Image (cartoon, helix red, strand yellow):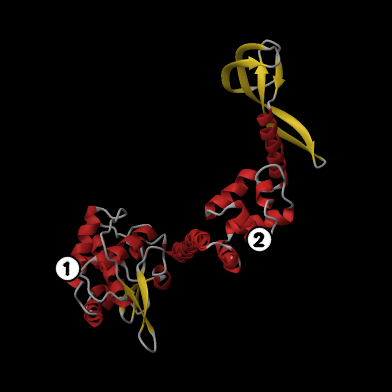
Amino acid sequence: MDMKIIKSEKRICPCCMEEHVVKTVLIMDQATFKNSTVNYEASYFFCELTKELYMDEQQMQDNDIRLKDAYRKKEGLLTSAQIGEIRAKYGISQSDLCLLLGWGGKTITRYESHQVQDKAHDTILKKIDQDPEWFLSLLNGAKANLSAESYQKYLAAATSLYEEDRDAYLRKAIEASYAKFQGNQMFHGNTDLSLDKVVEVIRYFASSIKVTSLYKVKLMKLIWYADALSYKRRGFAITGLVYQALPMGAVPVGHNSIIDLKGVPCEEVDMGETYAYHFSLSGQQTFPELSDEEKDILDVVIEKLGKMSKNEIINFMHKEQAYVETVPRDIIPFQYAESLQL
């Protein structure tokens, strides 16, 4: 019999009624559960003197869960531990999750211990795990039956998860739009796209007191100048963004999505007939994604362009050889960085 020894301790052995070292072991067991043959790893005590295996009450309970979790895995259901992890993700109690789902108050408690959930309930639990937006809608419906403290706690956790999911989807969409540029280093400045650095660069500009009236048009020019100056100095850009020559100057591909990335301090400002996007970040900040050399490059851009108005920076950009010689709406090659005005 193959046994995996996980612990040895001296104790009174009920098999031989002697005090000696008793081993706790794991062995592969087989049992039938719901008309299905299930193989699972069971825990036993092993008496060396009698060569017998035995269980105490706790092991009986644990082995019951091991058997049922093995059955769950075989049937593609969530294990008891996975159900607990879903709750932990939202920081929600067993009874409150039942309340949200309209289930009996002890249902989740049973699923996390001895009872195997049916496929309908399993599907619902998987949806909760994968869809924090749905959790938020359930939470809103159950708000009247939750304490204010619990509601706020669950709301904060679910909102954070929703934002992370949304950010992950947004990043994939942006990265997909950049796939076609991977083979042309003159388009992306000899640098793979790093959305983490894109966010850090935006935050760096937004946190500087030397940058005034930072709205979207101005921000896009500052980022281009940072990448172009980096390429001029080092032979590679900072962010890996690809820029088009649009009427108001260089604008990165996917600019509308980039400003929605998590961590970008963007605020919509009502301008009457339209909305503007303002970027501002106060307080002490750190920028772990940026090297000191990259911060120096950004500081040069800030010193030269930070106080310019939107129209001033557009006019300044329009004089760049990179803009003048690029066909409108085409990609601006980084080869023109050599003639940069900075």
Q: Quadrant of residue 268?
A: bottom left
Quadrant where the C terminus is found in the figure: bottom left
Q: Please say whether residue 8 is visible from this viewpoint.
A: yes
Quadrant where the N terminus is found in the figure: top right
Q: Which amino acid, by three-letter code, is at mark 1?
A: Glu
Q: Quadrant of residue 287?
A: bottom left
How much space separates mark 2 and mark 1, taking CA atoms? 56 Å
Residue 328 rendering spot, x and y as whole percentages? 35, 80
Residue 40 rendering spot, x and y as whole percentages? 70, 33
Residue plotted at (72% across, 45% down): 115
Residue at the bottom extreme, as displayed: 273
Residue 101: numbered disc: 2
Between 93 and 174, the residue placed more toward the observer is: 93
Between 63 and 222, the residue placed more toward the observer is: 63
Secondary element at image label 2? helix
Mark toward the viewer: 2 or 1: 2
Residue plotted at (23% across, 77% down): 313
Q: Which amino acid, by three-letter code, is at mark 2?
A: Leu
Residue 193 rendering spot, x and y as whole percentages? 38, 59
Q: Is residue 109 left or right of residue 278?
A: right
Between 64 and 198, the residue placed more toward the observer is: 64
Between 145 and 165, the residue placed more toward the observer is: 145
Residue plotted at (67% across, 42% down): 113
Q: Is residue 60 left or right of residue 173?
A: right
Residue at the right extreme, as displayed: 35
Residue on which disc 1 sits: 303
Task: Tell me the crowding category of disc 2: few under 14, some 14 to 19, or many 20 or more residues within 10 angstroms, Cα based.
Answer: some
Q: In the rendered picture of this protein, how many numbered marks are placed on residues?
A: 2
Task: Tell me the crowding category of disc 1: few under 14, some 14 to 19, or many 20 or more residues within 10 angstroms, Cα based.
Answer: few
Nearest to N terminus: mark 2 or mark 1: 2
Against 223, residue 308 (above or below) is below
Against 329, residue 146 (above or below) is above
